[in-house]
Image (cartoon, rainbow, N blue to C red):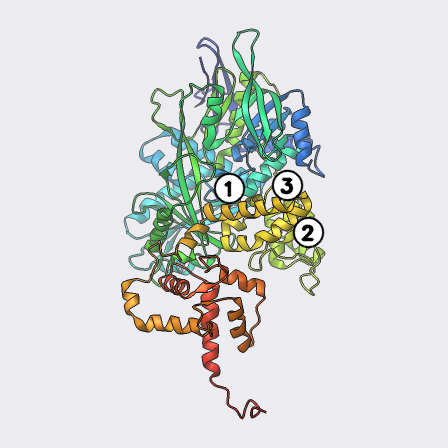
Amino acid sequence: MTSTVSLTPCTQRDCRAECHLIVCGCFKYSVTKDNASTKTNVTVPVLHVVQARLAYVAAEGELKQPFKDELPTRQAQLSTLQDTEEFDVLVVGGGATGSGCALDAVTRNLKTALVERNDFSSGTSSRSTKLIHGGVRYLQKAIMKLDYEQYMMVKEALHERSNLLDIAPHLSAPLPIMLPVYKWWQLPYYWAGIKMYDLVAGGQCLKSSYVLSKNKALELFPMLKKDKLVGAIVYYDGQHNDARMNLAIALTAARHGAAIANYTEVVHLLKKTDAGTGKEKVCGARCRDVITGNEFDVRAKCVINATGPFTDSLRKMDDGKNTNICQPSAGVHIVIPGYYSPDNMGLLDPATSDGRVIFFLPWEKMTIAGTTDTPTDITAHPIPREEDINFILNEVRNYLSPDVEVRRGDVLAAWSGIRPLVTDPNSKDTQSICRNHIVNVSDSGLVTIAGGKWTTYRSMAEETLDAAVAAHRLGGGPSKTVGLVLEGGQDWSPTLYIRLVQDYGLENEVAQHLAATYGGKAFDVAKMARVTGKRWPIVGNRLVSEFPYIESEVRYAVKEYACTAIDVIARRTRLGFLNVQAADEALPRIVDIMGKMLDWSDKKRTEELEAAKKFLYLEMGYRSRSEQLTGTTEITLDTQEVANSVLIDRYTNRFHKFDKDSKGFITTVDVQRVLQNISVQIDENALHEILNEVDLNKNGQVELNEFLQLMSAVKKGQVSDSRLAILMKTAEESLDLRGPVTVDRSGGGV
């Protein structure tokens, strides 16, 4: 009989579990093992500020960090995995929940291991909406349907929101979010709901929500559609850098002694026969180093399955008869330029055309819009669909002013994340999707944590370890992760970036970025920065000019267990998520730096470059841009444009000003020649990159039809900021302004 773990509110009026009369502040775990007659109830307090403070003191006062000064290398971590006779806990999965489980386990003084078959946060945990939130929608459902479970889910999430903002102040911050109102009756309705959100948060409310008049709303968010706008309501949630937050959790676990290894996959589970019951029990896993192919066994008293969308894969390794419980849903997000939203104000559209909620948020000086919610297949490499991108753009158009032209070409990056919704395997109705998360202990002892959301990763990990400790009699004491400051948070302050500027001669923007990404560890990154040779900045060569990422971050990324170029552009930095073109341009330098540090061969460097380009092309939306310039998509010269001979002639004449020899194509030599005539100099490598954006045939030439396709796409807004189009237009205007040079002025031809 499968063992189960259920979570129910404590109803005892005389409960003495330090609840201190806080409503719903106590939960009871029921762990049922092997047969219905054996049942253990453990009452534990959660969602309590006093407990949080006590845990913080305990964490700061008692916990030891064997690797406080220097993290062990990945090779050292692999050696520990292979050489340790038996761990108490082996966590499979390096996302937010898996890393949270490892941190919870190791801080309970349990001997802990974690393996991840890709990179830490390579899946869903790096592809979120970047919000730390309680869930306004869930609270609405809880009130409308008098749903206690939904209410408790929101209350727990709001507690975790507060805790996460405290333990990682460098990676997270409160964010005001505006809810525009276009009907008078909605104003009191939404206001009451948002005020209830503040009330449920109680003392952990970030800032009180407030109502804005139409004029004030437009002052704060001038891009809003003015017609029929009644007013707006502003409430506060948290925002974070999700991939870096995930990495901070994993690195904090490593600092405390957990053996963690990315690119280490589970081949199969190890089992042994229990002498007392005669049943097979999971006792570890056969693992394979994905990079070298080396296989080895990791033995553990307890194995935790925290693999997100791949939950069922490991469950079927345990028992092939297990049915699927994961119901994957795809959430697509797009990144557009920062001028689409104010610097510090998000926007929520609660009623889209199909009922889904759309967020519109500033992030890393860009704007994120999303998300969709559509059924999908489980894959390690989800690809954003064009129809999802266009759905988001259409919704954005609905609440932005007509003065703001929302162009498809402004999409700088797009990604899809798989949300692992689950059904409870112990539920009578196996078709119903669990609204929160489930913890399940199988007959063989495999502990599975599935479902949930980013914000509640810590409480999910605590619940999972409580279940594991009860099921496997591990000991180790209660959780100590409430208030436990994560990697980089200990020495961070809002003014830390000033010291980086003063002590190392970094640019102000770069220093702010390093402080907000690495916290107190930013000094370690700055120490690795090379001298620029310029008057200012003194150190810190940028990977690309328009983003504050510097070369020393690539070197530091290797210390943070980055193994591939994708790890750097997607998770150690967020360049791939912000601008695929910029990431593509930075790749050669990133591969060069990593190649020297990791001793890559020429063949390996080529493979890394190609793999990273494929990642950008498929998973980060680069393919969509390429398709917009081909004749196979809707973005072609339509009949009306073809009939407009004036327009065609204008573009053709512009092209021929560069194609002096009437070859029918232009090369970098042609462009360079024209630029010299107007006294403009551009590096040859930069020119190659500019032409390569439009060179669909990849033959080193831009042909007339390719140029006309480009101009058509630019005109329709399907492509924006095309360097070649802007360069050629500017050059043409400069040539026209100069006019013919007279013989007298040229010196008489002598």
Return the residue at label 2: 526
Q: Give the image quarter of residue 603.
A: top right
- Other residues around mark 1 within 10 Å, as few (<14) / some (14–19) / many (≥20): many
Secondary structure under tag 1 reads: helix
- Other residues around mark 3 within 10 Å, as few (<14) / some (14–19) / many (≥20): some
3 vs 2, front mark = 3
655 relative to 393, above or below: below
Circle nearer the N terminus (1, 2): 1
| Residue nearest the observer in this picture, 691 or 561 | 691
The residue at the point 64 percent across, 30 percent down is: 259
User: Where's residue 236, x and y in %?
Assistant: 45, 46
Circle nearer the N terminus (3, 2): 2
| Residue nearest the observer in this picture, 179 or 723 | 723
The C terminus, quarter of image: bottom right
User: Where's residue 504, x and y in %?
Assistant: 70, 56
The residue at the point 39 percent across, 56 percent down is: 628
Question: Is residue 500 shown to the viewer in this render?
Answer: yes
Q: Amino acid at mark 2?
A: Ala
Q: Is residue 711 left or right of residue 38?
A: left
Q: Give the image quarter of residue 371.
A: top left
Q: Is residue 388 left or right of residue 413?
A: left
Circle nearer the N terminus (3, 1): 1
Question: Is residue 18 shown to the viewer in this render?
Answer: no
Q: Amino acid at mark 1?
A: Ser
| Residue nearest the observer in this picture, 477 or 268 | 268
186 relative to 328, above or below: below
The residue at the point 53 percent across, 45 percent down is: 611
The N terminus, quarter of image: top left
Secondary structure under tag 2 reads: helix
Circle on res. 126: 1
Q: What is the CA distance from the residue labelled 1 to the residue labelled 2?
A: 25 Å
